[in-house]
Amino acid sequence: MTARRPAMKNQFFEWHGGTDEDHAVLAGWAAATPEDMGPVLARFRGGVHARLWAKGALLALDLGLALGLLRAMVGPGEDLTRDVVAIFVGAAVLVGGALLSLLLAARRRRHDVHRGGVVLRATADAPAAVVPWSSVDPGRVFVAPTTATATRWLAARVQRAVRPAAAVINGSVRGPGGSDDPDGTNAVLRHRPGTGDGPFGWWQIGVADPVSVLVAMESAMVAEGYPAAGMASRALFRETTLRAMGRDAATELDRALADPVVGATPDGD
């Protein structure tokens, strides 16, 4: 039987005034690759909101009723039943195909929990956004019942109908995969950033069960010696509903370079 590798005591990054070690850590985040994060411990795929299927069924029903009524009003009387049935079947196939396309597109998003960090990709072939554990503050993590990146009311409404719940984490946004470039491939994984251009920003991991992602992350951190015990339960307690306009400052605790780590300990509540 192979002995378990003893965990080293690690601490989440805190700024110490610009020491050589500070700059070395920041440079390491910028150059980090998925290989640097060690083996993959858990893999998650993106999803869609559970209520999308109910909304899709209602849409197919409404579409079938509207087209069926139109057929009854303007079409010949013979073969009416056959035509109405065909209309309902066609509406179901059309809406079902659209929902399947949305699901397949969402499933292209990959969220890999490695031994040393989490690696995020908006698509299977997108550049990896690497978020080392040392850059994460477990006290700033929270769960969002649905993700919304749009700031316009109508667009946000549409997003809420499609986008799943998410684990929203605060960590490194350095490196090519984590660029703040609004046109970047991984921009769809970025929660609305706060002010400032520091190394920390928000990532939203939208999956069917965001708590399972947080549990996997917490387990990996604790195994590496980080004081992250209780992160998942704390994040669930801080669950919030993201709105199209404005931010919940009490939940979305933006982090500047010199801000201390809140942490997952009870005194961080």
Image: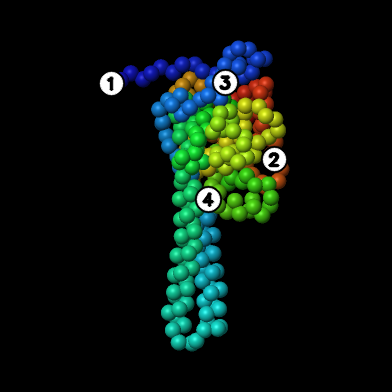
Q: Are marks 2 and 4 in contact (CB under 8 Å)?
A: no
Give me the disc on residue 110: none
Which label lies toward us, 4 or 1?
Answer: 4
Q: Residue at x 54, y 47 (%)?
A: 164
Give whichever of discs 2 and 4 has the lower sequence position: 4
Type of amino acid under label 1: Met
Write down the residue under mark 2.
Answer: 247
Give whichever of discs 1 and 2 has the lower sequence position: 1
Q: Residue at x 51, y 71 (%)?
A: 64
Write down the residue under mark 4.
Answer: 49
Under circle 2, the secondary element is: loop
Give me the disc on residue 1: 1
Quadrant where the image shows the N terminus: top left
Q: Let me know if residue 248 appears in the view.
A: yes
> Among all residues in the image, which is located at the extreme top?
20
Q: Are marks 4 and 3 in contact (CB under 8 Å)?
A: no
Q: Let me know if residue 143 appears in the view.
A: no
Graded by Cα atoms within 10 Å as few (under 14), some (14 to 19) or many (20 or more), the crowding at tag 4 reads: many
Image location (x, y in percent) of residue 53: 50, 57
Q: CA distance from mark 4 to mark 3?
A: 37 Å
Q: CA distance from mark 1 to mark 3?
A: 39 Å
Write down the residue under mark 3.
Answer: 27
Image location (x, y in percent) of residue 156: 64, 50
Give whichever of discs 3 and 2 has the lower sequence position: 3
Q: CA distance from mark 3 to mark 2?
A: 30 Å
